[in-house]
């Protein structure tokens, strides 16, 4: 476990899948992790990080960004419209666009602020009631709506149900992306990132396998 181990496993999975070395971006998911662990990974030279709450990211990242050049921040958690402005200002990518209303707010902010993060549309591949994401059958329409709003949609994202084989969900996401002409696939976490790479992941979101278990207390 740890950054070097995960990076090596990503390289092996790329080769095994016939993918170009370096074609998969590792997003180190630092949510809830102690500052010292995050700093250690920054010291090792890693620069791409994922957070799932705007507020938490806004508190911790500006001081790190003042000390470490070239940090890229990805929002991987649900986004409320009242936090959208801060998210557009702070993040380089948002992986959780899941409804027309949010797309409309992001488009207005992009106009006003003159910048927009790269966007992934989150798909609820398991159609789980408690999970965020657009239903698979509504994905094409949301992609089209985002494009009509001139938003920089680069791919799709999913979080498979915990009790199902993730590869089936990764394959579904890849199919939905291909038919919409999207090249980005944000899928795969600590337990299944190699399977995601086999199915075409371009971005894997790995937390505990890099930083250790999260302590929510
Ligand atoms: C927390 C989180 C991850 C990372 O989970 P690990 O199992 O710790 O790798 C990835 N994606 C999302 C959306 C998350 O919220």
Image (cartoon, rainbow, N blue to C red):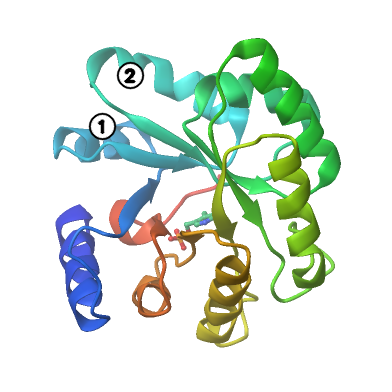
Q: Residue at x 17, y 74 (%)?
A: 12
Q: Is residue 59 above or below residue 136?
A: above
* 163 displayed left or right of 12: right
Q: Residue at x 27, y 25 (%)?
A: 70
Q: Quadrant of the C terminus?
A: top right
Residue, x 53% and y 73% (percent of image)?
A: 174
Marks 1 and 2 sit apart, C-alpha to C-alpha, by: 11 Å
The residue identified by callout 1 is: 39
Q: In the visual, does 15 lie left or right of 130? A: left
Q: Position of residue 41 (x, y in %)?
A: 23, 40
**How many numbered callouts?**
2
Which x, y percent locates residue 201? 41, 67
Q: Looking at the rendering, in which quadrant would you find the N terminus?
A: bottom left
Visible in this render: residue 32? no
Q: Is residue 33 above or below residue 65?
A: below
Q: Is residue 187 visible?
A: yes
Q: In this image, 22 relative to 166: left or right?
A: left
- Decide which of 81, 105 is in the foreground and name it: 105
Q: Which residue is mark 2?
A: 65
Q: Which mark is residue 171?
A: none
- The structure residue drawn at horizontal position 15% and vertical position 65%, both measured from the top left corner, is 8
Tell me the crowding category of disc 1: few under 14, some 14 to 19, or many 20 or more residues within 10 angstroms, Cα based: some
Quarter of image, res 85? top right
């Amino acid at each position: 476990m740890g950054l070097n181990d995960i990076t090596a496993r990503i390289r092996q999975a790329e080769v095994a899948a016939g993918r170009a070395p370096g074609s998969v971006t590792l997003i180190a998911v630092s949510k809830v992790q102690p500052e010292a662990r995050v700093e250690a990974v920054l010291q090792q030279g890693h620069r791409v990080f994922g957070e799932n709450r705007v507020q938490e990211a806004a508190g911790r990242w500006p001081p790190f960004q003042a000390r470490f050049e070239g940090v890229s921040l990805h929002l991987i958690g649900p986004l409320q419209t009242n936090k959208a402005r801060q998210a557009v200002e702070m993040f380089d990518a948002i992986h959780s666009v899941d409804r027309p209303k949010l797309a409309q707010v992001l488009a207005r902010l992009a106009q006003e602020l003159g910048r927009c993060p790269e966007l992934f549309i989150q798909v609820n591949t398991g159609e789980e009631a408690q999970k965020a994401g657009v239903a698979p059958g509504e994905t094409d329409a949301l992609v089209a709506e985002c494009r009509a709003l001139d938003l920089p949609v680069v791919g799709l994202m999913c979080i498979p149900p915990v009790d199902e084989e993730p590869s089936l969900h990764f394959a579904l996401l890849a199919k939905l992306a291909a038919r919409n002409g999207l090249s980005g696939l944000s899928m795969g976490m600590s337990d299944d990132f190699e399977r995601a790479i086999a199915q075409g992941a371009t971005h894997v979101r790995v937390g505990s396998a890099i930083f250790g278990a999260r302590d929510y207390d």
